[in-house]
């Protein structure tokens, strides 16, 4: 990034957003009494205190203050320029015999990364068994979500089903109803495809105002994995499904909530998978082990976990979670059903809420874009709250109904700015501004919020969640 004829280019650094900033006592209090204005204030104070503590402990912040009087960290002021002892002196781990092979037979992340966890937001639901654990998007690279950090959304807790006892049935408008064991299914022709999964309520708290501080809580009901299984159309053919007269399928789960969802036959025949594999291993119990339905582009609740039955029919079933939940509350008070497709959307994950820019200079702005209707065609990034836009680099692979990673270079001069990203998909659909979305959807809905996210970078380098219409 620098040449011998130019002065050193300032090097930007980020301080991570605080993790786990809520005390157990406050989480318990919110779970019992809900999130009123008083507890909202405690939540905000906890977040700010955790951020301040992180800043105080950061040696990088100290280096920034000592740099050159402007607050910037320059290459000339970096430790390496004076002879970095981390380079010049043998480190402890370079002078010992390391751990033996298979020390951790299944493998674990480094202890230095132990703080990156999926986290629950208190006050969302009365019980933890019917709640959400958000994926830490701010710590991910590329597009694949590690299995241990895949977001969770349950309606009656997760279960660990014995695969030897699990059965999967297809009935309804078929020539022959059939029951499959896991062995039966895993003998059939399999496919492996990478797709995103997003809960319909992702970003749901943000309809009215900027509600939560970090990207983990604004957009963390989102993950992307390579799923392996048998195409559903293979099984429907095996049972002789009446594809001429049938219009829908009903997917039913084997957990305590017996989650049931209506899915169009068109989606079922297109690219739906009855899956047992996730990123090269069996599904995790939290994600439906041993069998779940994968319906690319459709909201996550329809990817029924612990899948036990597909029923073929000619009309929607209006199951319990299709009449009062996962419906769109329109401005006139009516409920709109069966809007399951996750529309084109994007978000900047770095820098994002709660992080701090520790000096002026170069930053790589990075984020994720996705569409339930196809591939991402373009992502534009604004550094001035949407007045001007620059086209970001799309990193490969760019796949159908899959996350796409984007990056763009940026040199911060220390002025307050507002960062935004705006995605366009292969159908030509452009991600809307909040004013455009609220014009047709109002502010009281919960589901299917795909508005442009704004991050305000203050002169101090602190990054805040803000709304820009």
Image (tube, grey):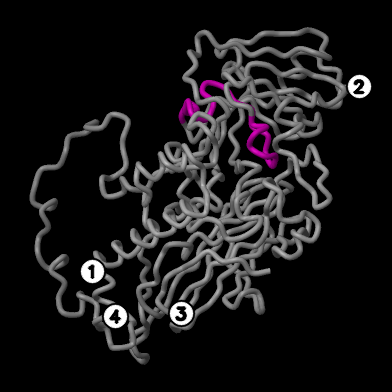
Categorize mark 3 by other alpha carbons within 10 Å: few (<14), some (14-19), many (20+).
some
CA gap, disc 1 to disc 2? 67 Å
Disc 1 vs disc 2: which is toward the camera? 1
Q: Earlier in the sequence, mark 3 or mark 1?
A: 1
Residue 395 visible to the viewer: no
Given contact means CB atoms under 8 Å apart, are the residues at marks 3 and 1 in contact? Answer: no
The spot of residue 83 in percent (x, y) is 14, 75
Q: Earlier in the sequence, mark 1 or mark 2?
A: 1
Categorize mark 2 by other alpha carbons within 10 Å: few (<14), some (14-19), many (20+).
few
The residue range painted magenta reads 281-303
CA gap, disc 3 to disc 1? 21 Å
What residue is disc 2 on? 245
Q: Residue at x 55, y 25 (%)?
A: 156
Q: Residue at x 35, y 42 (%)?
A: 25
Q: How many numbered discs, if any? A: 4
Quadrant location, the C terminus: bottom right
Which residue is outermost to the bottom?
A: 5
**Secondary structure at numbered mark 1:** helix
Disc 4 vs disc 3: which is toward the camera? 3
Q: In the figure, 246 relative to 403: above or below? A: above
Given contact means CB atoms under 8 Å apart, are the residues at marks 1 and 2 in contact? Answer: no
The spot of residue 78 in percent (x, y) is 24, 77
Quadrant location, the N terminus: bottom left
Q: Residue at x 28, y 45 (%)?
A: 110
Q: Earlier in the sequence, mark 1 or mark 4?
A: 1
**Secondary structure at numbered mark 2:** loop
Disc 1 vs disc 4: which is toward the camera? 1
Q: In the figure, 288 relative to 467: above or below? A: above
What residue is disc 1 on? 59
Image quadrant where residue 2 sits? bottom left
What residue is disc 4 on? 75
Q: Earlier in the sequence, mark 2 or mark 3?
A: 2
């Amino acid at each position: 990034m620098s040449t011998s004829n130019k002065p050193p280019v300032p090097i930007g650094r980020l301080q991570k957003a605080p993790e786990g900033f809520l005390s157990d006592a406050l989480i318990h209090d919110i779970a019992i009494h809900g999130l009123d204005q008083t507890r909202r204030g405690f939540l905000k104070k906890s977040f700010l205190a955790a951020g301040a503590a992180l800043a105080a402990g950061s040696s990088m912040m100290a280096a920034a203050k000592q740099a050159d009087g402007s607050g910037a960290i320059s290459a000339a002021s970096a430790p390496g320029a004076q002879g970095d002892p981390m380079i010049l002196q043998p480190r402890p781990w370079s002078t010992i015999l390391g751990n033996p092979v298979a020390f951790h037979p299944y493998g674990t992340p480094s202890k230095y990364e132990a703080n990156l966890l999926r986290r629950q937001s208190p006050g969302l639901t009365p019980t933890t068994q019917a709640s959400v654990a958000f994926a830490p998007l701010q710590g991910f690279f590329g597009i694949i979500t590690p299995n241990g950090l895949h977001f969770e959304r349950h309606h009656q807790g997760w279960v660990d089903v014995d695969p030897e006892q699990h059965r999967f049935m297809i009935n309804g408008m078929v020539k022959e109803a059939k029951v499959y064991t896991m062995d039966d299914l895993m003998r059939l022709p399999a496919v492996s495809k990478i797709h995103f999964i997003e809960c319909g309520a992702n970003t749901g708290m943000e309809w009215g105002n900027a509600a939560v501080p970090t990207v983990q809580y604004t957009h963390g009901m989102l993950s992307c994995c390579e799923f392996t299984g048998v195409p559903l159309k293979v099984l429907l053919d095996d049972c002789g499904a009446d594809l001429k007269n049938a219009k829908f399928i009903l997917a039913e789960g084997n957990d305590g909530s017996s989650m049931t969802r209506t899915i169009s036959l068109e989606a079922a025949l297109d690219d739906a998978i009855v899956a047992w594999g996730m990123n090269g291993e069996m599904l995790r119990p939290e994600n439906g082990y041993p069998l779940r339905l994968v319906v690319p582009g459709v909201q996550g609740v329809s990817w029924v976990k612990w899948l036990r039955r597909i029923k073929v029919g000619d009309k929607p079933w209006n199951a319990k979670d299709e009449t009062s939940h996962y419906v769109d509350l329109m401005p006139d008070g009516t409920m709109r059903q069966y809007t399951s497709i996750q529309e084109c959307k994007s978000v900047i994950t770095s820098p994002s809420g709660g992080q701090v820019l520790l000096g002026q200079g170069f930053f790589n702005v990075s984020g994720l874009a996705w569409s339930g209707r196809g591939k991402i065609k373009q992502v534009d990034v604004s550094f001035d709250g949407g007045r001007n836009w620059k086209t970001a680099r799309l990193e490969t692979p760019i796949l159908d109904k899959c996350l796409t990673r984007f990056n763009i270079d940026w040199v911060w001069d220390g002025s307050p700015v507002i960062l935004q990203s705006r995605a366009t998909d292969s159908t030509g659909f452009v991600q809307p501004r909040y004013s455009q979305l609220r014009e047709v959807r109002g502010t009281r809905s919960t589901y299917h919020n795909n508005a442009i996210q704004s991050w305000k970078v203050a002169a101090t380098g602190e990054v805040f969640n803000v709304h820009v219409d």
